[in-house]
Image (cartoon, helix red, strand yellow):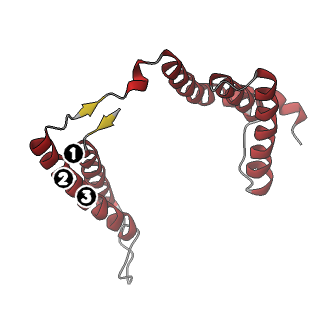
Amino acid sequence: MKLNDAVFGAIFLALGALVLFAIQGFPKIPGQPVGPALFPGIIATVLCATGVVLLFQGWQRRRAEGEPWLAWEPWVRSPRHMGALAVLIGSALLYILAANALGFLVTATLILTALFIVLRVPPGRAVLIAVVATLVVHFAFYKLLRVPLPWGVLTPYAW
């Protein structure tokens, strides 16, 4: 799917304006020339400026070349690719809904295995790679970065 630049420009402009509106309530720090709203305000201003440029360019291109607002790519008609997209979206939903109950190790292994199988990795290899990748990611986040990942069904065995 290809979206006209004007669509992204409008999204960026709206997001930047929303941030600029939200930072108005940030407190001022007495005796300080800058406050907590400075950096979000700078980023939001740049986002708004970028949005205006994209909006203008996309609108010009639409008028000059007749470029559509939305153009579907050929993969959208492919059942295999649509199935892979469904598994990807389902994986994100599964993690959101089941990670606390099942735990990171179980959920990530299931998700990676499903994604590898959709990408036509042989099932045995898919499971092996999913287990190894899950353990590596768990080690990196849980042990090195000290991010508290859920244990779920493995809570009694948490080490």
Look at mark 2 in the image and give the residue it sits on. 57
Q: Is residue 111 left or right of residue 125?
A: left
Q: Residue furthest left?
A: 63
Q: Height in image: 63 above or below 18?
A: above
Q: Is residue 44 left or right of residue 103?
A: left
Q: Residue 72: which disc? A: none
Q: Height in image: 13 above or below 120?
A: below
Q: Nearer the viewer, residue 43 or 133?
A: 133
Q: Secondary structure at mark 2?
A: helix
Residue name at image x 39 percent, y 68 percent: 39
Residue name at image x 30 percent, y 64 percent: 46
Label pair 2/1, CB-CB below 8 angstroms: yes
Look at mark 1 in the image and give the residue it sits on. 6
Look at mark 3 in the image and give the residue it sits on. 48
Q: Disc 1 or disc 3, which is closer to the eye?
A: 1
Q: Nearer the viewer, residue 122 or 139?
A: 122
The image quarter in which residue 111 lies: top right
